[in-house]
Amino acid sequence: MAARLGVSIATVSRALRNSHEVGDDMKQRVQELAREMNYRPNPFAQSLRKEAPRIIGVVLPNLVTHYYAAVLDGIEDYARKFGYTVFSSNSHESHEMEAAAIDNFINLHVEGIIACLAQDTVDYSHFKELHDMGIPLVFFARTCLPELFSQVIADGDVAAQNATQHLIDTGSRRIAFIGGPNHLDMVRRRKHGYLQALRENHIKIDRDLVKCGEISDEYARQATNSLLSIENPPDAILAFNDIITYSVFDEVKKRGLSIPKDVAIIGFTDGDASEHVTPKLTVVADKAAEQGNKACELLMRAINGDKKIYHEVVPMELCIRESSDKRK
């Protein structure tokens, strides 16, 4: 603001504090420019002028899941090396809570933000505000506005295609996909890979086997039971994430069906539990901590003045265990 007005920083500071040392005309000019630039006072800078903490904010949809906890761990590990403290906020998959978290981070004057969209977010105005204010932002996993912000995603399309191909190669033919809302790019990528594998193997696509709705235990259980109740049920299920994976696993077992003989299962998750259930789960490992590291690296670049927009892809890995091969 001082540069725009051609005055000293001290003059702007006094005008914002309504000091008698600055004339009314200058106060008005400063306050009008402050509104135009959406300026907000920084409580940290005011109370700790010489030793203000270096803070970045992270907005996560569901912190209690292994994936998001591992991403946050990767972010914190990278940020710590550069003297940054990480504040995290759980949106609980709510657009309203996500927008409130962004607003809180703006008020805290964090130096940058890393975010993953809540599943019901279709209005991106709170993120556009960050761009207009010049606050660095990096998305990971579920993203939007690729023309404005750097992003870190997994190769979900390739991973889903490889997982579906493995199911086909090991004896499955009626393969279902249970995912989240179709507007999420993360869901679209994984569904695309699943469908591509069916096409390349000349397996007819049955839309009744594709269930994309809410990312929740309740929806996953409902979708699983719906699929298993149709006249020609699936003999395999590819599950979008860890919440859906374990709900599918539990509902299949509740019906007394054999995994993988009756229903093979592959899930997108690599939490410790995948190796401690019976049968052991074949999973697509999401490399969550690596994604967190990369997202924080891109944020640090932006904070340090790099204006380039990056689109990074972290490859996933198919970990074959017991739940997917009908031949055994």
Image: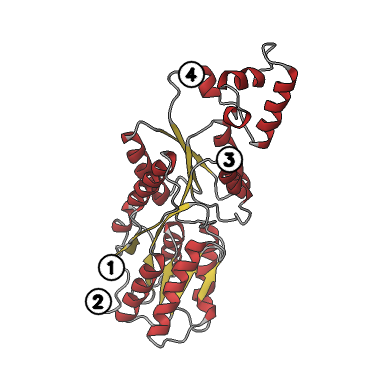
Describe the element under mark 2 as helix, strand or loop: loop
Is 207 on the left-hand or right-hand side of 16?
left
Picture layout, residue 77 above or below residue 232:
above
> Is residue 15 shown left or right of residue 169?
right
Q: Residue at x 48, y 18 (%)?
A: 48
Q: Nearer the viewer, residue 253 or 287?
A: 287
Could you give the CA–CA distance between mark 1 and mark 2, rounded to whole angstroms? 9 Å
Q: Residues within 10 Å of mark 1 (few under 14, many from 20)?
A: many
Image quadrant for the C terminus? bottom left
Q: Is residue 202 visible?
A: yes
- x and y, in percent, of residue 170 in the image: 29, 79
Q: Nearer the viewer, residue 221 or 270?
A: 270
What residue does disc 4 label?
49
User: Is label 3 or label 1 in front?
Assistant: 3
Question: How far is disc 2 from disc 3 in space, using C-alphas?
Answer: 58 Å
User: Mark 3 sits on what residue?
Assistant: 133
User: What residue did someone put label 2 on?
Assistant: 328
Lower position in the chain sequence, tag 4 or tag 2:
4
Callout 2: few (<14), some (14-19), or many (20+) C-alpha neighbours within 10 Å?
few
Pointer 1 and pointer 2: residues touching (CB < 8 Å)?
yes
Instruction: Tell me the kind of residue under disc 4.
Output: Arg
Quarter of the rendering occupied by the N terminus:
top right
Which numbered disc flags the more N-terminal residue, 1 or 4?
4
- Res 147 label: none
Who comes first in sequence, dot 2 or dot 3? 3
Given contact means CB atoms under 8 Å apart, are the residues at marks 3 and 1 in contact? no
Which of the marked residues, 3 or 1, is nearer the chain's N terminus? 3
